[in-house]
Amino acid sequence: MRLKSNFFHQPTLKVAEELLGCILVRKVDGQLLKGIIIETEAYIGKNDPACHASRGKTKRNQVMFEKGGVAYVYFTYGMYHCLNIVTEQKDFPSAVLIRAIKPISNIAQMKKNRKKFGGREVKDDEIANGPGKLCVAMNIDLNLNGENIVKSNKLWIEKNPTFEIKTLKIKKTSRIGISKGKSKLWRFLLK
DNA sequence: CTCTGGATTAGCT
DNA sequence: GCTAATCCAGAGC
């Protein structure tokens, strides 16, 4: 069952936590690429120094100011993309960064994408175990920035019917790869 | 216009 | 553990 807009209008921390175990679906060339979300991070509002929107609205981060339910894709370190899901209400800049997934469908195609990008074979458990990697594996780039994932036929998220998350299985830590706002335990991963 | 550094990754030591 | 790769948004002038 596809997640609807109401889900993304909830507080960002709740969305970040509840996205764990859900299925990220990407449709490209008629193929469905799917993966279970196993790691997320929350970036919340102007007062969060690690959030791209902390210094106001710009051309790059304007999508974060949209109403929850759209994709925010940005380019970083000269070679990688990161996928975020915008949350909460219009003009409240917040998003959940999808940091890692476990591929469950069309794994071979995702491997191919990674090999094409990196030029060599990758192991199954290395296909999408990082934000840059999962974008390569799923063919996600700036074309999907601003994509409405509630309505889109290219990218969306489904509830996982066979996967009940217990709070006990969720680990919270500080966010990765940032220099500001490290004290917040806004990274969520499945044990 | 120029300069700096980043929500990363892979390869090498 | 350390760092090059590689480019653009944001900031400063």
Image (cartoon, coloured by chain):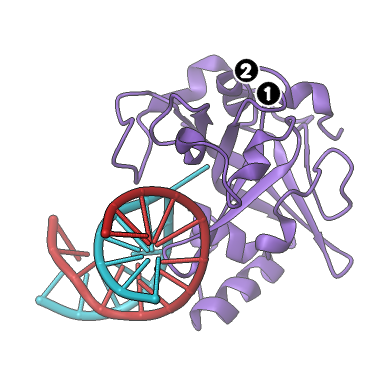
Chain colours: A purple, B cyan, C red
Residue at 72% x, 35% y: name it: A66
Circle 1 SS class: loop
Percent from the top left, x then y, of residue B10?
38, 72
Residue A167 picture quarter? top right
- Above or below, A101 against A126 in this view is above
Q: Does residue A67 appear to the left or right of B10 in the view shown? A: right
Callout 1–callout 2 Cβ contact below 8 Å: yes
Circle 2 SS class: loop
Residue at 68% x, 23% y: name it: A88
Where is the N terminus of chain A found, in terms of image quarters? Answer: top right
Percent from the top left, x then y, of residue B13?
10, 76
Which mark, residue A88? 1
- Above or below, A62 against A143 in this view is above
Residue A27 picture quarter? bottom right
Question: Of A44 and A126, which appears nearest the observer?
Answer: A44
**Neighbours of disc 2 within 10 Å: few (<14), some (14-19), many (20+):** some
Percent from the top left, x then y, of residue A136?
59, 65
Q: Which residue is mark 2?
A: A11
Residue at 61% x, 70% y: name it: A111
